[in-house]
Image (spheres, helix red, strand yellow):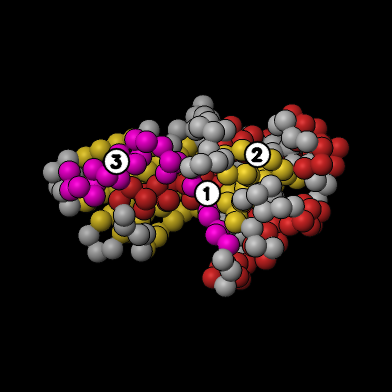
Amino acid sequence: MSHSLKMGLIGGGPGAFIGDVHVKAARLDGGVDLVAGVFSRDSAKSRQAGRSYGLADERIYPDIASMITAEQALPEDERIDFVAIATPNDSHFPVAKAFIEAGFHVMCEKPMTRSTNEARELHELVSRSPAIFALMHNYTGYPMVKLARDMIRAGDLGALRKIVVQYPQGWLSTALEQTGQKQAEWRTDPARSGAAGCLGDIGTHAANLTEYITGLQITHICAEVMTFVPDRRLDDDVSCLLRFGPDVRGILHASQIAAGEENALRIAIHGEQASLSWC
């Protein structure tokens, strides 16, 4: 790469979680440079965050429309190359749609949308656009995960038989959303998170990992979706039996009420000749 890609960021303001992670990851090897963004719905907080990232005030925007208009007006070699969306789930679709329609490449946190109707609309939009839409599943970037995938492709495990993936967290083992904690509030609010809680937040990571490493697709699911914390409006624990075609079986467990666990994602894959595990 002869020059750094110029990234815009949506989200990542004070009190946010994943936006700052994306900035740090982008800056690891000099291949990507954060140059612009809307970091909060609150313009003062957006400015505070942008300055903390080292951005010039004129590239810290108060809203999405202003950012798109201003970036389109810049010379091509100065405007953003792509935008990363790191906001709560309810804004993924409208923000991605706006940037795709404006001709910008988009990298979006999962889930892509809150509903299949929104997903279909976004898919149709992207299919008609030269812009690229990429959905983030960050664990696929880990070197050992890539090695596991390569080993399976090379036949080191033989024919696959069983896949067991677990993703326990404990941070929602109490009604944290009732204390004003920002991350817990939106993740347990159906209007902002969508129809799924734990399943959509971390179960998707576990499911994605099974398919990425093995190259197989989940074809059948039998799931028990639970809400253990009283008065919580979305699921906080899920147990699934999986089928990957006719011959391979799987188990997926994801939980955010596993007290004492922090972020304990792990996967084991068993074949006729060998097994592997990653955690």
Is label 2 or label 1 in front?
2
Q: Where does label 2 land, which residue? A: 34
Q: Nearer the viewer, residue 162 or 61?
A: 61
Distance (Cα) linking label 1 and label 3: 19 Å
In magenta stretch: residue 147: yes
User: The C terminus is located in which quarter?
Assistant: top left
Asked whether residue 191 appears in the rendered view, the answer is no
Task: Say if mark 2 contacts mark 1, CB within 8 Å.
Answer: no
User: For residue 58, what is the image quadrant?
Assistant: top right
User: For residue 32, what is the image quadrant?
Assistant: top right
**Which contiguous range is marked in magenta?**
131-156
Q: What element carries label 1?
A: strand
Q: How crowded is mark 1: few (under 14 residues within 10 Å), some or many (20 or more)?
A: some
Mark positioned earlier in the residue sequence (1 or 3): 1
Q: What element carries label 2?
A: strand
Report the side of 11 relative to 201 (left or right). right
Vertically, is 15 above or below 80? above
Q: Position of residue 246 (x, y in %)?
A: 24, 64
Q: Nearer the viewer, residue 190 or 278?
A: 278
User: For residue 270, what is the image quadrant?
Assistant: top left
The amino acid beneath tag 1 is: Met
Report the side of 163 relative to 132 (left or right). left
* Residue shown at the point (72%, 30%) measured from the top left: 54
Distance (Cα) linking label 3 and label 2: 32 Å
Q: Position of residue 173 (x, y in %)?
A: 59, 35
* Residue shown at the point (51%, 45%) measured from the top left: 202
Q: Where does label 3 land, which residue? A: 148
Task: Say if mark 1 contacts mark 3, CB within 8 Å.
Answer: no
Q: Nearer the viewer, residue 32 or 203?
A: 32
Q: Seen from this angle, which residue lies furthest right?
A: 44
Distance (Cα) linking label 2 and label 1: 17 Å
Report the side of 278 relative to 78 (left or right). left
